[in-house]
């Protein structure tokens, strides 16, 4: 071992879904949106003045923050933006979870939470979902389980299940002395947001992203909305890390995306329709899954191991996500693509099952 | 105090130079380049396919990493990229400086170093520059001062002074058991890089940025070059923080900037020429300054307090940087702008001194 290695922070990094570089694949493995971003995004990028790129961007990303504040009916002082919701969440862990008590999150959830906790040496406890993969609110009450903070996605990932707004409020209310983060990466596809609660609870931080419902994964934009007090703490830590996280291109693209509400509504509803269509098809093929409110379906088949299906799909250039982890190793997480992509997926699966002599409806 | 505030990380954030939004100002306060980025950058942004923005960017930013590896004659595995050199440096502090012993850096230097150390709770010692504002290499030798790492800019900021390559190598050689970071944000304006040393010393990390010499402050691109072992550690921590830090737009713009070596050489030399011209003018006005090798001049006037000059310049819509800090509170840091901007600056100063009845040559 080299001398300097003893001072290196040891981590087991998060492994993102593959980003295969081949053409002509069906990519349903990282929950991207099948539709392009709002047409205004292209225009905004074309109109960027190259001359101006020599100057630093606005460190406060004022234009984007204001667009979000207007869209969600809050003050600009209640909005924080970052390089994807991963950046926003990492900053939030660093800012809010400095307690000797453990942070609580589900055992089956976004697999970056434990990575951030390990990175920043934050104690944590992973609370098992019930056998139906549901979050039980009372498991997260401070009175039942003293904690240094709570975080969960809603809808949860990779299960796609929504926790109802009353249950979310209970968790926030029962943890007045810590910050509760609701990670709403997938909320726009038909679930209810906790945003209306931020005026009432100054310990609630709601995090969302442009990567899914706004079709801008490639630009990296996430945001948090909360009380002015919370956002101010988050900004202090951000300004202690990197003054300028949002490039001029990102600010322009994000602002343009928020401006087009009609396109946003149209595309998220189209994704939801395709999801419901896909559910029917998968059900007919004998797949089992919960009622996903996200832009993916988390499904298993009673007669074929998920890993076998994953590999067969991959062989057919259809990429879905498989997690080799306890409790979920027999599930596939299938992102919702275009109608045509989902047809190709379900046709492949029907044919695969037929060849295995598995009866389908 | 609210309950949750006790778990908040307390920080005193870095304060970036002002980004005034008025038009018709001369902005010489944040060391930006007066020239626009290479023409290929504009093209690259125009050619970005909006359709493709719905997909995540390449998490490894392969295209940009490869362009840098080719340009600097190293392997792609020796290159790390981030959201400006601030992101690269913040990640480096988090990755490499996990020791009980203090990290060493100069007392007069980039004022983000102590902010990162405080943020990540890294012990540190600020070593005074000598009275000529020079770094004394032996102050940083492990044998003289046991430490958990070393970082300094070369040329130093805000002094602009270059440390000669032998002295840099001495510091690296005398600290084999810790990582030594040379922050070369300004190196392209006439100083010598430590890059040739990375093949020999696996504990040397050289950090550079696109914000100054490549006129891309607005896009946020920084990079580090070092041994494969160092870069691998840095990537592990990065992937534990945010899988995708570089947007598609940033990767495309950065790659295009690196491609145009001729433009790069032409513009950095133009900046250097204007710097030398400005030095002559300032000298004639009685200003005192060291021999800056950066794209700024750190100057004081024996007869007028820097703060007074700063405010007078500001009143004339000329923004320079003033640091209200021990030892340097009588200096101005003046970025090198266009020849015309520097003419307006020096003409204003000449007139100001004349009105004060201060004799100039």
Image (spheres, coloured by chain):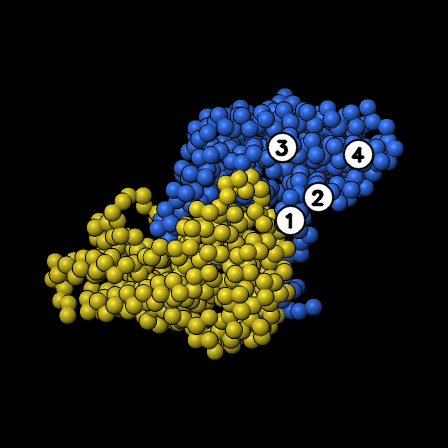
Chain colours: A blue, B yellow
Q: Position of residue A4 (x, y in %)?
A: 62, 66
User: For the residues marked 4 and 1, what is the alpha-carbon distance in whole angstroms?
Assistant: 24 Å
Write down the chain letter for disc 2: A
Q: Are both tags, 4 and 1, on one chain?
A: yes
Residue name at image x 58 percent, y 50 percent: B58
Q: Is residue B178 left or right of residue A315?
A: left
Residue identified by numbered label 2:
A317
What chain is tagged by disc 4?
A: A
Q: Secondary structure at mark 4?
A: helix
Query: In this view of the protein, can residue B226 be seen by the observer?
Result: yes
Circle 1 residue: A22
- In the image shown, does B272 or A276 lie closer to the viewer? A276
Q: Are marks 2 and 3 on the same chain?
A: yes
Q: Earlier in the sequence, mark 2 or mark 3?
A: 2
Q: Is residue A258 above or below residue B14?
A: above
| Mark 2 secondary-structure assignment | loop
CB of mark 1 within 8 Å of CB of mark 2?
yes
The first of marks 4 and 1 along the sequence is 1
């Amino acid at each position: 071992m080299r001398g300097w290695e003893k001072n290196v922070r040891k981590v087991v990094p998060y492994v993102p879904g593959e980003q295969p570089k081949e053409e002509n694949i069906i990519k349903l493995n990282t929950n991207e949106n099948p539709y392009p971003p709002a047409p205004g995004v292209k225009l905004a990028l074309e109109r960027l003045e190259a001359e101006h790129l020599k100057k630093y961007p606005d460190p406060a990303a004022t234009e984007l923050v204001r667009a979000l504040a207007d869209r969600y009916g809050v003050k600009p002082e209640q909005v924080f933006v970052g390089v994807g919701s991963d950046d926003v969440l990492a900053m939030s862990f660093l800012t809010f979870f400095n307690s000797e008590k453990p942070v609580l999150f589900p055992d089956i959830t976004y697999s970056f939470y434990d990575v951030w906790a390990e990175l920043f040496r934050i104690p944590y406890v992973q609370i098992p979902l019930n056998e139906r993969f549901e979050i039980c609110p009372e498991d997260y009450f401070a009175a039942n389980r003293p904690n240094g903070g709570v975080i969960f996605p809603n809808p949860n990932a990779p299960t796609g299940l929504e926790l109802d707004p009353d249950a979310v409020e209970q968790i926030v209310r029962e943890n007045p002395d810590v910050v509760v983060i609701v990670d709403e990466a997938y909320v726009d596809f038909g679930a209810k947001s906790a945003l209306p609660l931020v005026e009432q609870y100054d310990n609630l931080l709601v995090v969302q992203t442009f990567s899914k419902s706004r079709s801008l994964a490639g630009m990296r934009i996430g945001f948090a909305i909360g009380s002015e007090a919370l956002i101010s703490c988050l900004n202090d830590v951000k300004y202690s890390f990197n003054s300028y996280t949002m490039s001029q291109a990102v600010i322009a693209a994000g602002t343009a995306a928020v401006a087009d509400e009609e396109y946003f509504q149209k595309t998220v509803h189209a994704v939801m329709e395709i999801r419901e269509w896909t559910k029917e098809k998968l059900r007919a093929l004998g797949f089992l899954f919960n009622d996903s409110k996200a832009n993916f379906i988390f499904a298993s088949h009673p007669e074929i191991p998920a890993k076998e299906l994953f590999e067969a799909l991959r062989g057919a250039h259809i990429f879905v996500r498989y997690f080799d982890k306890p409790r979920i190793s027999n599930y596939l997480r299938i992102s919702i693509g275009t109608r045509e992509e989902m047809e190709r997926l379900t046709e492949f699966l029907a044919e695969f099952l037929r060849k295995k002599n598995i009866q389908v409806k």
